[in-house]
Image (cartoon, rainbow, N blue to C red):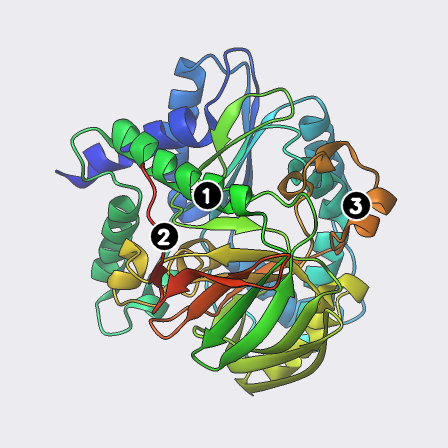
Amino acid sequence: MDFTTQLQRYAELTVKVGLNLRPGQRLIIIKAPLEAAPLIRLITAEAYKAGARLVDIFWYDDELTLARLRHAPRDSFAEVAEWKYQGLLQAVQQGDAVLSVRGEAPDLGRGFDPDLVSEMQRSQWTHFRPALDILSRNGTNWTVIAAPIPSWAAKVYPDLPPQEGVARLWQQIFRFCRLDTPDPVAAWQQHARELSARCAHMNARQYVGLHLRGGGNDFRIGLPAGHLWMGGSGHTLAGHPFNANLPTEEIFTLPHKDQTEGVVKASLPLSYGGQLMEDFSLTFAGGRVVDLQAAAGEDALRNLIGSDEGAARLGEIALVPHSSPIAQSGALFYDGLIDENAACHLALGKAYAFNLTGGDQMTAEELAAAGANASLVHVDFMIGSPALDVDGLTADGRAEPVLRGGEWAFAVAG
């Protein structure tokens, strides 16, 4: 199958399965890399064919960020273009669909003052938070996809010529999104049913916590009463189905913000804000990071955890089998959307309200009382490996196998 056909299929999958765009709805595309213009044009056309009233795009370019880091006044990095964030907030408030396109250099901030990079990132998150609060409650349909650019591909495939690296990365993303199947939409729907069956099993068990061991991990996570495991397709508050991530292999829920104890070891590097954090571990007590170590990027990691009070606590626990096609590719993609679907992972920062029964109707105070973490940030890092075992902890003190050797320890009917 040629590239043009696969790109068209990717656009159709994004609109029909990811966003499940409704006739009459508007679509806002954010952080679209300039290099992804051919894909964005196809998505725009598919959106209008699906009945969109308006499609608008906020473009992104690594070179503009680099120009700022090199030449902007050192006291200006807390400043943002407020109108963009106000416009996005207005869009989600009125029910417009949102598509985020990931494609940037993983180590864009390397060599620059990590405090400046952190300040720039924190300011952007601060202004994005009102819209994020609505999206985290599934107030409208939203999807995140990936689009390779040369600087990203060069990091993943440093030994390939630039054009070959980009082509290889495209082919991997197409495969992860099941675009190499005769009917990608049907293949995706079947995959979503299997993930939903996993969620149903875990929701029926209602474990009070999880114990994770192996690969340098030995820690316990409390789970709040009424927690909900989700994966594959979700629903807006109005009941409209959509898929938030393409690709996805995870089921996930929220931990209790005050009930994480022990040591967590990252199994893959974390790329965040153009900085790489490698071979790091975090020690938790009372739900909060109390110590950390990193072979590289330790200052960046400390800045991330210091973004606000909630950034030192967990907002997500996700389970992914090691047999995931992304893990089996053997590649490290230096991107959270892709790498998080290669391994079990945790997220520092904000919890999603929809992972708690009735959470989408709770106030911030009610969510906190129920155990949901609040933060400006939500940053996933990977901990899964073939050595990881996970037990579900019952209210009467028993431990039941959930993962063994990185694979599911229970069967479901998909």
Instruction: State the residue position of label 2.
Output: 410
Q: Are marks 3 and 2 in contact (CB under 8 Å)?
A: no
Quadrant (top left, top right, bottom left, bottom right) of the N terminus: top left
Indicate whether 136 appears above or below 274: above
Residue 375 location (% of width, % of height): 75, 56
Q: Residue at x 40, y 38 (%)?
A: 197
Mark 1 burial class by Cα count in 10 Å: few <14, some 14-19, many 20+: some
Indicate whether 85 appears above or below 71: above
**What kind of residue is marked 2?**
Phe
**What kind of residue is marked 1?**
His
Residue 83 location (% of width, % of height): 75, 38
The residue lying toward the viewer, choosing from 289 and 149, is 289
Instruction: State the residue position of label 3.
Output: 367
Left or right for 348, reference 363: left
User: Distance from label 2 to label 1 (Cα)?
Assistant: 9 Å
Indicate whether 408 appears above or below 289: above
